[in-house]
C-alpha cells in the first residue's frame, strides 16, 4: 500500500485543515479534517480530531467498527469539553481505517472519501450539507454541489452539541488488490471533477503520482479564485 498527503493554506491567512497518516504493523489510519470557526477555533477543532484518532489508534483496536466509533465519540467529547464559550469551534472529519486486512470509513460534514476498484469509481461519501439534501430531493444534480451558493452550509459537524450520532460509518470490507481511496476537504474536491480524479488514477503507478496529478488540476483550476485551505490523502494498493 502506498499513500501520500498534502495540506495547504491556499489563499487564506490560516490553515484550519489537519491530516493524519499512520501505519502500525500492517494496519493504517488516515484522517482529513476541515476546521470551522473564526479566531483559530476551527484549526484547534481539526487538530483535536487528528490527535484523538492517533491516540485511539495506538491502543491497538481489534476491529474497524470498534476503533472508528470509539474515536469519533472521543473526539466529539474532547471538542465539546474544549469549546466552553467558543461555540463556533467545529470541524468536518473523514477517516479510513485498515485493521486486520479489512477496512471501513466514517465521516461527518462535507470532507469526502472516494473509493475505487481497478481504477473505477465505486462510491463516495455523501456530504452532510444543504446541497446534498437538494440532490436527494431531485432539485439538483450531484455535480452541481461544487458551485451551489449554499455549498458551505453543513447539517452536521464535529462539535455540534445536538443529541444523537453525528458520524456515519460504512460497512466493513476485506481489502483486496487494485483498490484506491481519496480523502479530501471541500477546498480540494470543488476544483476537480470525479472524471479528472479517475483519469489521474488510471495514469498513476503509486499514490504520490496520483496526488501530484490531482494537485496540478486543483491548483490550476483554483488559481485566482481565492482558494480555501485544501487537503487530501491518496491511498493505493
Image: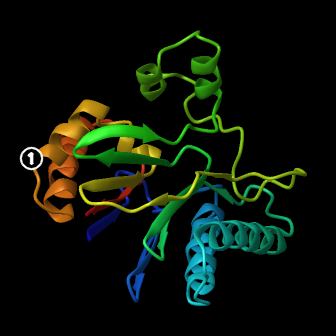
Residue at image x 21%, y 62%? Answer: 207
Task: From the top left corner, tell me how far across and down residue 235 is, in percent.
Answer: 30, 62
Residue at image x 30%, y 55%? Answer: 180
Dividing the picture into quarters, in which one does residue 128 lie? top right
Q: Nearer the viewer, residue 67 or 62?
A: 62
Q: On screen, 129 above or below 211?
A: above
- Can residue 193 be seen from the camera position used here? no
The quarter of the rendered structure image containing the C terminus is bottom left
Q: On screen, 150 above or below 17?
A: above
Task: From the top left corner, tell me how far across and down residue 177 is, in percent.
Answer: 26, 60
- Residue identified by numbered label 1: 203
Q: Secondary structure at mark 1?
A: loop
Task: From the top left corner, tell me how far across and down residue 84 is, in percent.
Answer: 86, 70
Q: On screen, 76 above or below 160?
A: below
Q: On screen, 141 above or below 126?
A: above
Query: Colour scheme of this structure image?
Result: rainbow
- Can residue 64 be seen from the camera position used here? yes
Dividing the picture into quarters, in which one does residue 87 lie? bottom right
Residue at image x 14%, y 44%? Answer: 202
Question: Is 15 left or right of 60, judged from the image as shown?
Answer: left
Question: Is 161 left or right of 146, judged from the image as shown?
Answer: right
Amino acid at each position: 500500500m502506498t499513500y501520500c498527503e498534502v495540506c495547504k493554506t491556499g489563499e487564506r491567512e490560516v490553515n484550519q485543515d489537519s491530516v493524519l497518516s499512520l501505519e502500525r504493523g500492517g494496519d493504517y489510519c488516515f484522517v482529513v479534517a476541515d476546521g470551522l470557526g473564526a479566531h483559530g477555533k476551527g484549526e484547534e477543532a481539526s487538530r483535536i480530531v487528528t490527535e484523538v484518532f492517533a491516540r485511539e489508534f495506538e491502543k491497538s483496536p481489534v476491529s474497524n467498527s470498534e476503533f472508528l466509533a470509539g474515536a469519533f465519540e472521543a473526539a466529539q467529547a474532547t471538542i465539546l469539553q474544549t469549546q466552553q464559550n467558543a461555540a463556533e469551534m467545529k470541524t468536518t472529519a473523514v477517516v479510513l481505517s485498515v485493521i486486520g486486512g479489512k477496512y471501513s470509513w466514517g465521516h461527518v460534514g462535507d470532507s469526502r472519501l472516494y473509493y475505487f476498484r481497478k481504477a473505477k469509481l465505486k462510491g463516495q461519501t455523501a456530504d452532510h450539507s444543504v446541497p446534498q439534501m437538494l440532490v436527494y430531493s431531485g432539485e439538483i444534480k450531484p455535480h452541481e454541489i461544487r458551485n451551489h451558493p449554499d455549498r458551505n452550509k453543513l447539517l452536521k459537524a464535529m462539535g455540534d452539541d445536538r443529541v444523537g450520532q453525528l458520524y456515519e460509518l460504512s460497512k466493513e470490507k476485506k481489502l483486496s488488490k487494485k483498490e484506491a481511496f481519496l480523502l479530501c476537504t471541500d477546498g480540494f474536491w470543488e476544483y476537480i471533477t470525479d472524471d479528472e480524479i479517475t483519469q489521474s488514477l488510471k495514469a498513476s503507478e503509486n499514490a504520490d503520482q496520483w496526488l501530484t496529478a490531482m494537485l496540478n488540476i486543483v491548483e490550476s483550476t483554483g488559481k485566482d479564485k481565492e482558494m480555501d485551505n485544501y487537503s487530501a490523502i491518496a491511498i493505493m494498493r
